[in-house]
């Protein structure tokens, strides 16, 4: 017998092939794991490769035009033509600018003084002011550069218009002032979704969850007993991050901390609901981990934590509008960095309450069936 024949005979008698066949059969039966292993990376690559953009454009901007002249309108057109600013309306005073930036409905404002047109006609040096929400350094840097270009483009024959930039809330453009408050939402998501789902699945695997079911305790108390400790851990994490952020990075704490704790409740409840829902779908801890990160990655990448949402294509922004972290980040940065109060944050709070009620209701029903 040739050497090749001996090798084939040896391989045919090897226990490797039955073992390999058994693993493929088992994998075929576990369709959820196979779908996550193959499908999720492809979906995430297509989604995030299309959605993630770092070039920030189309910042919502308002105009306070106190000149009301053809020259002022030319400056507004020049600002719009940079494509970094989307003119979404006009305001009548500076207080409205502040209130709308605090609410997060706009990111910049152009202020044109009353003597703007007269200065141009006299051949002087006309000035205008652009206020930029500098809480996001990446977006504000692009806006500042574009505003300077718009001033030069509006009147090139006279050497351009002087655009005075005034960054609000983060004048030094420190990225930590933008990233660290967002860490509160990020770590809460990881703790409340990933760890909660895995903890419940772990108990189901060990059989301890079924033991709790047969004890004299109602299902509501059982579920509350499972999720309330994670909510307490979430509030402890919030406190630790804000204290260390203030001590190590000088993070501003401009707004009401009690208000932040109250508005964090629907986000915490909604995240716990997602973790509970994952635990009803996953059969193993590995599946719970994979499903949790399937929810987590869009939460992180499409919510505005790492990349400005204004830079994303419209479909990605619509998808991000369905994620709870999108609204919670606005609350965090609005209260901590801008000092916004409840009148500015109630739309985001309402969105989180709606999400929490819907997800928790669905999750509790599924969880009741799985332990029933």
Image (spheres, rainbow, N blue to C red):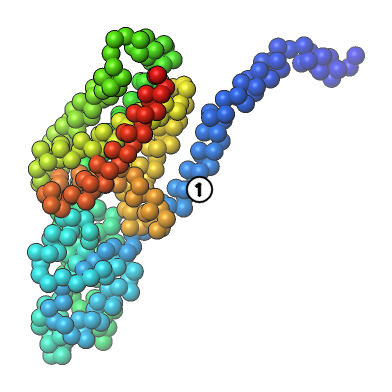
Residue found farthest to the bottom: 121
For residue 181, side relative to residue 295 (left or right): left
Name the image quarter holding the N terminus: top right
Q: Nearer the viewer, residue 245 or 67?
A: 67
- Residue 37 at x, y percent in the picture: 54, 32
x and y percentages locating residue 68 in the rendered image = 16, 82
Quarter-of-image position of residue 171: bottom left
In the rendered image, the vertical position of residue 253 relative to residue 205, given as above or below: below
Label 1 Cα neighbours within 10 Å, binned few <14 / some 14-19 / many ≥20: few
Image quarter of the C terminus: top left
- Residue for point 47% across, 48% down: 47
Find residue 246 and report its horizontal and vertical position in percent: 13, 38
Identified at 69% across, 20% down, the residue is 21
369, above or below 294, in the image:
above
Residue 81 visible within the image:
yes
In screen coordinates, is 156 left or right of 5?
Answer: left
Above or below, 91 against 176 in this view is below
Residue, disc 1: 46
Image position of 196 (left or right of 30): left
Q: Position of residue 83 (x, y in %)?
A: 34, 69
Q: Residue at x 37, y 45 (%)?
A: 301
């Amino acid at each position: 017998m040739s050497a090749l024949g001996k090798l084939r005979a040896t391989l045919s008698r090897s226990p490797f092939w039955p073992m390999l066949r058994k693993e493929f059969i088992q994998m075929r039966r576990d369709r959820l794991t196979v779908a996550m292993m193959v499908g999720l990376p492809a979906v995430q690559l297509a989604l995030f490769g299309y959605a993630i953009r770092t070039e920030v454009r189309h910042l919502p901007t308002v105009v306070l035009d106190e000149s009301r002249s053809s020259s002022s309108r030319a400056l507004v057109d020049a600002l719009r033509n940079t494509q970094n600013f989307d003119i979404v309306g006009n305001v009548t005073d500076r207080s409205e600018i502040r209130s709308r930036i605090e609410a997060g409905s706009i990111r910049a404002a152009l202020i044109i003084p009353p003597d703007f047109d007269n200065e141009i006609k006299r051949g002087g040096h006309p000035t205008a002011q652009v206020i930029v929400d500098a809480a996001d350094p990446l977006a504000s840097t692009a806006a500042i550069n574009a505003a300077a270009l718009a001033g030069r483009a509006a009147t090139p024959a006279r050497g351009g218009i002087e655009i005075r930039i005034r960054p609000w809330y983060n004048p030094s453009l420190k990225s930590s002032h933008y990233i660290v408050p967002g860490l509160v939402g990020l770590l809460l998501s990881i703790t409340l979704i990933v760890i909660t789902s895995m903890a419940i699945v772990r108990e189901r695997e060990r059989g301890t969850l079924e033991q709790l079911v047969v004890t004299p305790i109602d299902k509501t108390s059982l579920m509350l007993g499972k999720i309330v400790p994670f909510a307490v851990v979430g509030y402890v994490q919030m406190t630790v991050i804000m204290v260390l952020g203030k001590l190590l990075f000088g993070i501003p704490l401009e707004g009401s901390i009690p208000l932040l704790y109250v508005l964090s409740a629907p986000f915490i409840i909604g995240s716990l609901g997602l973790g509970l829902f994952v635990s009803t779908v996953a059969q193993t801890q590995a599946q719970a981990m994979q499903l949790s990160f399937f929810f987590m990655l869009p939460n992180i990448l499409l919510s505005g934590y790492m990349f400005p949402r204004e830079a994303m294509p419209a479909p990605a922004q619509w998808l991000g509008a369905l994620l709870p972290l999108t609204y919670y980040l606005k609350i965090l940065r609005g209260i901590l960095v801008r000092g916004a109060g409840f009148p500015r944050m109630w739309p985001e709070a309402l969105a989180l309450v709606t999400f929490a009620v819907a997800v928790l209701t669905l999750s509790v029903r599924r969880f009741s069936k799985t332990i029933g």
